[in-house]
Amino acid sequence: MRYHIRVDRADQDSDSDPLIEALKRDIDTTLLERNLKLTPQQRIDQLVEMQRFAAELVEAGRKAREPR
């Protein structure tokens, strides 16, 4: 999905960026806040677990496509 937003820097406040304001409406900050509360090690552990799960899905898909 692409967003095309015309930005005229001369007419804008120094504190607000129209692109940022437009994108803020579509961001669920609760997930960001929850992840920022984790320690770096907890984030790595979460990533490793997600990669394990993805590998299981790939393997299950491969097995499902095998001829019987």
Image (cartoon, rainbow, N blue to C red):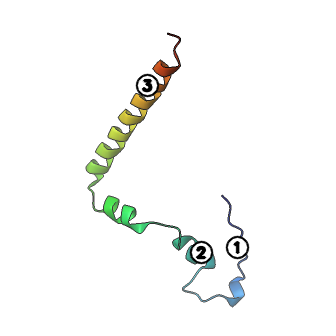
> Could you tell whether 22 is left or right of 34 in the image?
right
Name the residue that disc number 1 marks: 5
Dot 1 lies on which element? loop
Q: Please tell me which residue lies in front, 1 or 11.
A: 1
Q: Position of residue 9 (x, y in %)?
A: 69, 83
Q: Are marks 1 and 2 in contact (CB under 8 Å)?
A: yes
Residue 50 x %, y %: 37, 40
Residue at 46% in and 19% down: 63
- Residue type at mark 1 is Ile
Looking at the image, do the residues carrying marks 3 and 2 touch, with CB atoms under 8 Å apart?
no
Q: CA distance from mark 3 to mark 2?
A: 40 Å
Distance of label 1 from label 2 (alpha carbons): 9 Å
Structural distance between the alpha carbons of marks 1 and 3:
43 Å
Q: Position of residue 68 (x, y in %)?
A: 49, 10
Check disc 2 and give the amino acid type: Ala
Amino acid carrying label 3: it is: Ala
Q: Examine the image and state in which quarter residue 60 appears.
A: top left
